[in-house]
Amino acid sequence: MPNHVHAILWFQAVGKISELMKQWKRTSSHRIKQQLRTMPNYESQLGAGDPIWQPGYYDFNIYSDSKLQEKLDYIHGNPVRAGLVFKSEDWFDSSARFYLLGERCRVPIGYETTRIEND
């Protein structure tokens, strides 16, 4: 989505989401600001200290297969409800192509291990 992100994450250890969100927001903010600096219309509007992300995040513990499917359906339907595409699998950064069509997509799917570095 152009103005927010949904992700379904799984951690073996408890309490890792806050660490991941801190690192992800820091890294993505830096990269987004670098990209915006190359766009003349945005460069003048964005101050060095202006935030990219709102503080905090909303997490939800998925406790069943049916709840997982409900959340996937909601996430995949977001760009359709927003009028950005006609079919969820047409959204560029969606995992819908993987789940609905069995095709590879830009979003990593499955039990991939990512190491989060401590500062």
Image: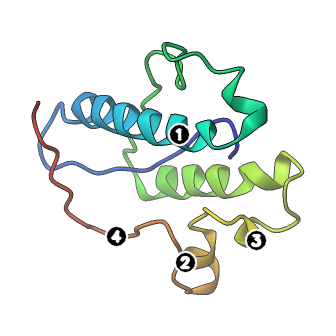
Identify the element where label 3 is drawn. Answer: helix
Q: Is residue 95 left or right of residue 111?
A: right
Q: What residue type is labelled 1?
A: Ile
- Residue 26: x and y in percent read 35, 31
**Reading the chain from its start, which is encountered first: label 2 or label 4?**
2
**Reading the chain from its start, which is encountered first: label 3 or label 1?**
1
**Residue 36 vertical position relative to residue 98 in the rendered view, above or below:** above
**Residue 53 vertical position relative to residue 41 in the rendered view, above or below:** above
Residues packed near mark 2 inside 10 Å, few (<14), some (14 to 19) or many (20 plus): some
**Reading the chain from its start, which is encountered first: label 1 or label 4?**
1
Identify the element where label 4 is drawn. Answer: loop
Label number found at residue 110? 4
Q: Which amino acid does label 2 sit on?
A: Phe
Q: Is residue 117 left or right of residue 46?
A: left
Identified at 71% across, 22% down, the residue is: 44
Cα distance in 3D space between marks 3 and 1: 23 Å
Q: Name the residue under label 1.
A: 32
Q: What residue type is labelled 3?
A: Asp
Q: Name the residue under label 2.
A: 98
